[in-house]
Image: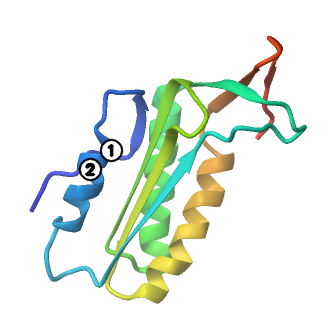
Amino acid sequence: MNEIPESGMYEKGKLDFIKVISEALNRDPGKDGIVLYYVGTVKELSKDGKKVKQLYIEAYKELADKKLKEICYDAINRFSTNDCRIYHFYGYFMPGEPLVVAIIWSRDRSQGLSALPYVIERYKKEPTIWKKEIYEDGTSKWLEE
């Protein structure tokens, strides 16, 4: 069984998420009927239609790590999935770059497909993570969500 890193906040570039995604496929051969991946990326346009040059993410790492692990624990118990991981990155990101990866392993697709939106909605609201959009025109704005 491959060693998959714990859920948590990771500085941009400190976790090879492509390797993690690849290793997730071979985590426990034969046990999982489905492996779901969600990769959230930086949008090119803000909700106001402004062109985003960069997105800055910062977090209260200890609390965010704890919350991301709690969300996965709750998803496993609520939907009877085999496992769950959430990796959220912090630092400066360009449009198109990944900033969050969620992985769910489950025996059946119905369990995994039910758990994934639950995990996404919770990670977007609960951890102590702040986002600041930096626009092409030189202005910036801290986001509420």
Q: Quadrant of the N terminus?
A: bottom left
- C-alpha separation, residue under disc 1 versus residue under disc 2: 5 Å
Nearer to the camera, 123 or 100: 100
Residue furthest toward the left?
A: 1
Residue furthest toward the right?
A: 48
Q: Which residue is mark 2?
A: 20
Residue 74 in the image: state x and y as whole percent: 49, 64
Q: Quadrant of the C terminus?
A: top right
Could you say whether the residue bearing mark 1 is in a helix, strand or loop?
A: helix
Could you say whether the residue bearing mark 2 is in a helix, strand or loop?
A: helix
Residue furthest toward the top?
A: 138
Q: Is residue 45 above or below residue 57?
A: below
Q: Are marks 1 and 2 in contact (CB under 8 Å)?
A: yes
Q: Is residue 113 above or below residue 49?
A: below
Mark drawn on residue 17:
1
Q: How does the figure colour the protein chain or chains? A: rainbow
Q: Amino acid at mark 1?
A: Phe
Residue 6 in the image: state x and y as whole percent: 30, 46
Nearer to the camera, 97 or 74: 97
Nearer to the camera, 6 or 78: 6
Mark drawn on residue 53:
none
Q: Amino acid at mark 2?
A: Val
Direction from residue 138 to residue 132 in the image, left or right: left
Residue drawn at x 19%, y 81% is: 31
Residue drawn at x 52%, y 33% is: 63
